[in-house]
Amino acid sequence: MTDRTRESGRLDAGELRRRTADLLVSCPPAETAPLDFLRARFDAGLAWVHFPQGLGGLDAPRALQVVVDAELEAAGAPDNDPRRIGIGLGMAAPTILRFGTDEQKRRFLRPLWTGEEVWCQLFSEPGAGSDLAALATRAVRDEDGTGWVVDGQKVWTSGAHQARWAILIARTDPELPKHRGITYFVCDMTDPGVEVRPLRQITGEAEFNEVFLTGVRIPDAHRLGAVGEGWKVAQTTLMNERVAIGGARQPREGGMIGVAARAWRERPGARTHDLHQRLLRHWVDAEVARLTGERLRQQLAKGHPGPEGSGMKLAFARLAQQISGWEVEFLGEDGLAYDDWTLRRPEGVDFTGRQAGYRYLRAKGNSIEGGTSEVLLNIVAERVLGLPPEPRTDKDAAWKDLPR
Amino acid sequence: MTAPSGAAAPTEPAPAQPGTDPDLLYSEPEEDLRAAVRSLLADRGGPAAVLADLESGRAYDTGLWRPLAAGMGTAGLLVPEKLGGQGASAREAAVVLEELGRAVAPVPYLTSAVLAVTALLGCETDRPEVTAPLAALAAGRGVGVLAVPLPTAPGTLPEPSVRADADGLLTGEVTGVADAAAADMLLVPADGPYGYALYAVDASAGGVRVAPGVPLDLTRVPARITLDRAAGRLLAGQDTARAAVTGALLTGAGLLASEQLGIAEWCLTETVRYTAQRTQFGRPVGSFQALKHRMAALWLDVASARAAARNAADALATGGPDAPVAVAVAQAYCAPVAVRAAEECIQLHGGIGMTWEHPAHLFLKRAKADEIALGTPGRHRAALAELVDIPAP
Ligand SMILES: Cc1cc2nc3c(=O)[nH]c(=O)nc-3n(C[C@H](O)[C@H](O)[C@H](O)COP(=O)(O)OP(=O)(O)OC[C@H]3O[C@@H](n4cnc5c(N)ncnc54)[C@H](O)[C@@H]3O)c2cc1C
């Protein structure tokens, strides 16, 4: 696996196709248990081709992942259900890759990718949402100095009820200003002291949770990044979260617009001129959002990342909300119905799943989860456009002295 | 006005102007009525109590309906005194609906006290078949519903899906009838020996089945009515029946705008209250100009919605020729304002707004269902195109 096809060190599409074909020969999907196939795929470096060798990748250009995915899909290979393990794939993995020790990378990445271990994100707290750095959950060195003891409460934790591991940020020094006294950990959700309570949401289901942490012991080996550097580490997670929520690659008419267009084609009787005009407007917006994402990917492949990335989640949330709202209205009498209000704990997050009313209600979260649209617009205004920041009184004061 | 040569004859009628100046304010008795309804609703515990009560499986809040409809007499506002009502008008009923919207109250006011009552008032009100049920509904004794699908717009009366035979036995099915599961009496449009006709059917009669669905809006539940040779009493036939049903839908749509106004008002008020008190980054989030301007813009929309809704109520009360325009304008304007206010309410509450325990979702679900009810904004804009002579291309 150490051989390289070109001196430049980068694999090309042809070589990836050959390696994919080899995998399909050694593990024919029809005769291999799905988990065994996924493990073999990871070990072949075909999980995320841009990751390092030995950690699921081949140091190949990220843009070539699609080549592998297309070949495997055509061959009927099992996938790792990204809906269920989205937080691991989208947020935990890139953070571990960038800040983890070799030991941590080897321990966590493989079962994360195969879906054997599900991850959740213990960031938000009742008093710290948009202002995440205000968090109050404490981590204190334990008696013998080999680890930490964590106390606090987290909220809105998606998938905590299924998670084996969590990425967690906690305050380790209240004397420092709020951004500087935070440390980043990996928390074992099966540890005593971790209590997960379902939090029912607008859709009727409980996709997210409250998580109470009482005297939870975390070994120092499960710290990610240096003590007090947690905010910097969290930035990597948050940036990747935004891309994960808004930046999925879509075919034309993928996502919510595809659902709406299908409804339109299937129900000639419900059509009106007004709805037609609005659907076409949404269609154009969705297509342009898709092209903006494509363009961003092409820029990235050439090594010139553009600021459009910050806009993708904003565009995604707006589109999802407008189109799902359009669909409920278009369905008329059927739009007045809901499928099921019983409290349940979904297996995964599925923005376009179930029926129109569910999609409409769930989409309301798209502009809140992973940073609200208002906060993202502030980021665009300040970091992309370079506009002066809001006046900040709390930046240099010790966290313990901030009003709460 | 001088027409350029070759243009249409100058005698061509200008678009309809409102007849007399509408009264867009609230009278003192109207404000008293509002205060009484609001205090009754507050006693019942407001939106939080609605939420707690939701999954009780009851068709509506009987403990609220009785004092509201019978005790305070609001069910009879649209009914003349000599027919057992309060002899008030659409203006007063609109005030009640504003308050019910503000409280997302699960009561059949729009369906029984507005739609069913107006349909009966459109029939010949000197016949006992009409006066008896009218008096009952006006007194808040029992609930009646007009058996048409909730999305039906005033101008688009569908052919009945129920057939009547010569003995007055009704067979067929009507879907999406709001509050039907709460009803004692169904007013059913049917096709039969009298052409298009309106019949009264007791909900408890043989051959009547009412099956509520799972609703998006948990506070106003649509149901499917199935009739299998159910006994109906003829209320009106032919043109009278058509006019009665169309008139009911027009009044319903016009007054629904007031409910939408109430929803929007609660959402704005509650959002202002919450964002003024929730702090992030060391200051109330409502102090961020990005949020301030959003709420100020919403305030402007709500103030405008109030004018539009009042105008519709006043036009319906005076029975002027401008009523269809006033109703179409009110619906085209107020429905989206209510939806947007509820959406903004959730967004500006952040994560809390996405939870079940916060009542914001009740308002969103009601606002979204109200947008479909009695004609979508698009249908009302299309109706307006005809009414004010701005034809489609
Ligand atoms: C469906 C869902 C899933 C979630 N999953 C997770 C999860 O798995 N893990 C996790 O840690 N968190 C999760 N969250 C939490 C989410 O990240 C927070 O809700 C979000 O960051 C907003 O914080 P808040 O709810 O405290 O709102 P607040 O910060 O209180 O915001 C209230 C309002 O004020 C606005 N506002 C705040 N600051 C500013 C500003 N500076 N300028 C302008 N406007 C501002 C906000 O945009 C919002 O409209 C989830 C949330 C949802 C809805």
Image: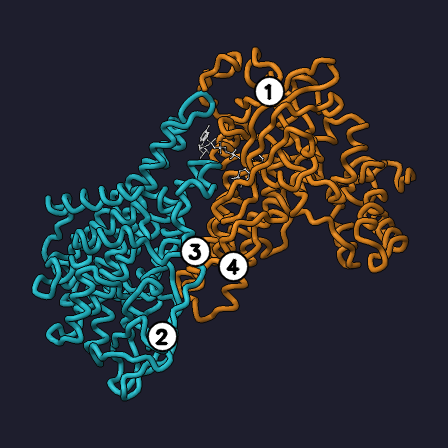
Chain colours: A orange, B cyan
- The percent position of residue B377, horizontal first and vertical second, equals 34, 58
Tell me the quarter of the picture where residue B331 sits: bottom left
Spatial CA span between label 4 and label 1: 46 Å
Q: Quadrant of the C terminus of chain A?
A: top left
Between marks 2 and 4 in the image, the one whose residue lies nearer the viewer: 2
Q: Secondary structure at mark 4?
A: helix
- What's the chain of the residue with tag 1? A
Query: Do we see residue A355 in this rendering?
Result: yes
Q: Amino acid at mark 4?
A: Ala
Q: Amino acid at mark 2?
A: Val
Who's the residue at 89% across and 40% down the image?
A4
- What's the chain of the residue with tag 2? B
Q: Secondary structure at mark 1?
A: strand
Provide the residue designation for mark 2: B208
Spatial CA span between label 2 and label 1: 63 Å
Q: Secondary structure at mark 2?
A: strand
Same chain letter for marks 2 and 3:
yes
Q: Are marks 2 and 3 in contact (CB under 8 Å)?
A: no
Spatial CA span between label 1 and label 3: 41 Å
Between marks 2 and 3 in the image, the one whose residue lies nearer the viewer: 2
Q: Is residue B186 left or right of residue B357?
A: left
